[in-house]
């Protein structure tokens, strides 16, 4: 038997019990009226956690990376200028996907561990079609100011669409897509939403949808076709058009996780993540460890910490897993061996998890 893991890495996190229980409910067909009710309720709850009224808000039947793909293949026309704020691995991936869609990519490079410089991004090109940024950069543990980026575009009178990665922010820190001017957003279920990997919560507003690629490169992720089955269809009613066999058990699980979050209260959930992250970061510093992400922009739900000199990063992570059943993540890119990533997301954003990971890390470092 596999021992239960404490998933304190960059994702997935341990799911909310409500999300797990929903997987054991009787399986429904993807056009069953009861499933369509669950799907429509799930889309409505996603609007709440996204902070949007967008009719086209839905869980794509794939992981967060497919959400990124859907965002670009549906909105990037060949030759479009796409400005991408790059301050970590997932900003880099945005540039790759945009280029594959035929965009002229303007990458605004930042030092890893630093938040996005809004002024540099806004001045990178006079008339981009899309400006893209990562809200919570999973590779570095940094939060960037999406509200300021959206406000800056509006003050310039820019017609650019604002495209945002919210994979590590949704359900864990403040996210207000409509208020901040986000036109397209994608996320994942496996982090602060407290659901297993497998779905990509997605939202797109009318302005962006009207400018979409009419026949995108991806049939499966064609939002024009998907809207007849889920999201838009649930809001407008009428006959559903078959598109694909949705992962009905996963949607039911997301429904359970979102119900749990909204019963607690979204702002209370944000506060719980903040308290857990503050306690973890304070404890790590009391142990003499150095945090990696810039002060003032550190994510509460994903903490990055420098590996002490002379310590074997992989050996520590292995012993944490073998001895304590605790998973933490290695760093990304050039920081793979010099940074640890510790996530307290969803169900794991609580005081006992903070104490557990601190005690276990102190034990293993003492042995090292």
Image (cartoon, rainbow, N blue to C red):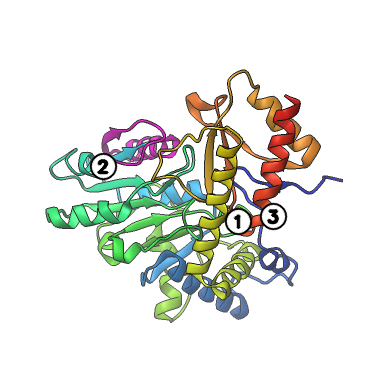
Mark 3 Cα-neighbour bin, 10 Å: few <14, some 14–19, many ≥20: few
Image location (x, y in percent) of residue 268: 52, 68
Confirm whether residue 4 shows in the render.
yes
| Residue range corresponding to the magenta coloring | 88-117
Label 1 and label 2: CA atoms lie apart by 35 Å
User: Compared with residue 167, is residue 314 higher up or lower down, i.e. above or below?
Assistant: above
Residue 366's x, y, as percent? 73, 29
Circle 3 residue? 352
- Rounded to the nearest angstrom, the CA distance separating label 1 from label 3 is 9 Å
Q: Secondary structure at mark 3?
A: helix
Asked whether disc 1 touches disc 3, contact meaning CB atoms under 8 Å apart, the reply is: no
Which residue in the protein does label 2 denote?
82
Q: Earlier in the sequence, mark 1 or mark 2?
A: 2
Q: Nearer the viewer, residue 352 or 61?
A: 352
How many angstroms separate mark 2 from mark 3 (CA)? 44 Å
Left/right placement of residue 183 relative to residue 280 reads: left
Q: Residue 88: which quarter of the image?
A: top left
Question: Disc 1 marks which residue?
Answer: 349
């Amino acid at each position: 038997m596999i021992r239960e893991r404490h998933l304190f890495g960059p994702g997935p996190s341990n799911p909310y019990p409500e999300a797990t229980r929903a997987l054991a409910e009787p399986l429904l067909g993807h056009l069953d009226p009861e499933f369509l009710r669950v799907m429509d309720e799930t889309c409505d709850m996603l609007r709440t956690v996204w902070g949007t009224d967008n009719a086209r808000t839905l869980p794509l039947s794939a992981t967060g990376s497919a959400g990124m793909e859907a965002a670009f293949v549906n909105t990037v026309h060949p030759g479009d200028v796409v400005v991408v704020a790059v301050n970590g691995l997932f900003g880099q991936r945005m540039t790759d996907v945009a280029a594959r869609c035929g965009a002229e990519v303007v990458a605004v490079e930042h030092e890893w561990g630093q938040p996005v410089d809004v002024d540099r991004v806004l001045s990178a090109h006079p008339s981009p079609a899309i400006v893209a940024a990562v809200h919570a950069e999973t590779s570095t543990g940094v939060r960037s100011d999406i509200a300021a980026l959206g406000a800056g575009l509006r003050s310039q009178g820019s017609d650019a669409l604002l495209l945002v990665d919210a994979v590590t922010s949704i359900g864990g820190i403040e996210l207000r897509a409509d208020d901040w001017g986000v036109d397209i957003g994608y996320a994942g279920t496996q982090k602060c939403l407290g659901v297993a990997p497998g779905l990509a919560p997605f939202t797109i507003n009318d302005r962006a949808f009207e400018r979409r690629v009419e026949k995108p490169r991806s049939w499966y992720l064609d939002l024009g076709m998907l809207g007849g089955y889920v999201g838009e269809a649930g809001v407008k009613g009428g006959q559903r058009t078959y598109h694909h066999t949705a992962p009905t058990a996963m949607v039911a699980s997301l429904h359970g996780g979102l119900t749990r979050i909204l019963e607690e209260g979204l702002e209370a959930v944000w506060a719980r993540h903040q308290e857990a992250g503050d306690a973890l970061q304070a404890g790590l510093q009391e142990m003499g460890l150095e945090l990696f992400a810039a002060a003032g922009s550190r994510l509460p739900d994903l903490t990055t910490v420098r590996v002490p000199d002379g310590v074997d990063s992989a050996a520590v992570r292995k012993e944490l897993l073998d001895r304590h059943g605790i998973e933490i993540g290695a760093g990304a890119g050039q920081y793979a061996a010099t940074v640890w990533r510790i996530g307290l997301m969803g169900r794991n954003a609580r005081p006992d998890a903070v104490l557990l990971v601190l005690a276990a890390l102190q034990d293993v470092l003492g042995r090292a």
